[in-house]
Image (tube, helix red, strand yellow):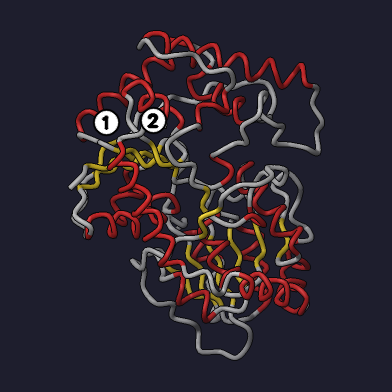
Amino acid sequence: MAKIAYAWEFGAGLGHVGAFLPMARALRERGHDVSWIVADVAATARLLTKENFTWLQAPRHAEVPREGPPLTYADILLRFGYANADGLLGLVVAWRELLRLSGAQLVMADHAPSALLAARTLDLPVVLFSSGFCVPPRRHPLPNMRPWNPLTQERLHAIDNLALTSINAVLGRFGKAPLQGVGELFDVAEDTLLGFPELDHYAERGPARYWGNLPDAGVGGKPIWPELPGKRLFAYLRRECRHHEAALAALKELGQPTVVFFPDAPAATLAHFAAPHLAFSGAPLDLDATAAQADVAITYASLSTTTRFLLAGKPVLLLPFHLEQYLMARRVEEMGAGLLCDPEKPADDLPQKLRHVLFDPSFAANAAAFAAKYAAFPQAAVIDNLARRAEEILATGASQ
């Protein structure tokens, strides 16, 4: 039996923990002890309370504003402790102690760069458990995440080098060799990219190994659709979505049988948009069952939920509210399997986009083509492959 720590630093909601839960179950069934260090303890409690897992709060650094939006992955790091070596040292020391407390022999890191750095100082092997957004291409400097806004190489190098200075100062504190670029932080024992190349946030990544999508955690209830004729729509909304009210207004006007998962929805919002054809749920739903029964989904472009519907051959309308989701939505739109609503623009065209995705057969055809391409890619096999790879690394003791 080995002790394995799941490390999650950036993000919120159910997507991260929900994606790892099937993996954690499989590792436990194989005799391993899995501990959880998580960014969002409230979301974790929703899913793990009945699973007999325990969890600890991950170290967090309050966001420090920088001019303009994030331009590269290093620019994101600079906003969360990497602009200052002392701030980063505080994060790394906290992660080191949590990993020691867990007794971890292997770290499975889900968007947890500071955990990667801490594991490096402890010579612990790491398996990345992340989407493409969380694992930037190994380039120095790291690429521009907003290619529609070109940046000079000088600007990219300046951003990278500022974060790299803090990283190397912390590594030096623990007697470890410096990195030549921020991207080297992700040189670990196993570079796992969850998902599929069509949905990689970095379209220009080049050759990479994609492990596919994991099965749904299966902790939600079955959807209860309004007993009305028409096409079935599913919406997964959050208050952070700038256009969530515009989406609800469009769904109310459309009149099709709809299930809306809206955790923590304001009571006033539920009352305002109440209608016989809209069924609201505050509890998680079984996404596999929901995707099988729905005709179209509206999501905020989270990787897990969006991929689930595409693998079921269902097109999507996407309401991203931050950069990771926006990049994902752009890839779906490029596939022709959905449309995105730009969070920085008014939602005047949202009703038309919803109707377009729902009634234009080309979107369903492109989603079905994606599903057919990966129909022989059993998601249950992804867990077995990852578990075997983790055990191989544990057996060899390799840290990189």
Foreground residue among 252 and 238:
238
Q: Is mark 2 on a helix, strand or loop?
A: helix
**Classed neighbour count for the residue bearing mark 1: other residues with Cα under 10 Å, few (<14), some (14–19), many (≥20):** many
Q: Position of residue 374 (x, y in %)?
A: 59, 69
Which residue: 65% across, 59% down? 318
Report which quarter residue 222 is drawn in: bottom left
Q: Residue 115 carries which label?
A: 2
Q: Of label 1 and label 2, which has the lower sequence position? A: 1
Q: Residue furthest front?
A: 396
Q: Mark 1 points at which residue?
A: 99
- Above-or-below relation of 377 to 26: below
Q: Is residue 76 left or right of residue 147?
A: left
> Which residue does the image show at 56% across and 67% down from the upper left?
235
Give above or below for 163 relative to 18: above
Q: How crowded is mark 2: few (under 14 residues within 10 Å), some or many (20 or more)?
A: many
Q: Could you say which is closer to the camera, residue 91 or residue 396?
A: 396
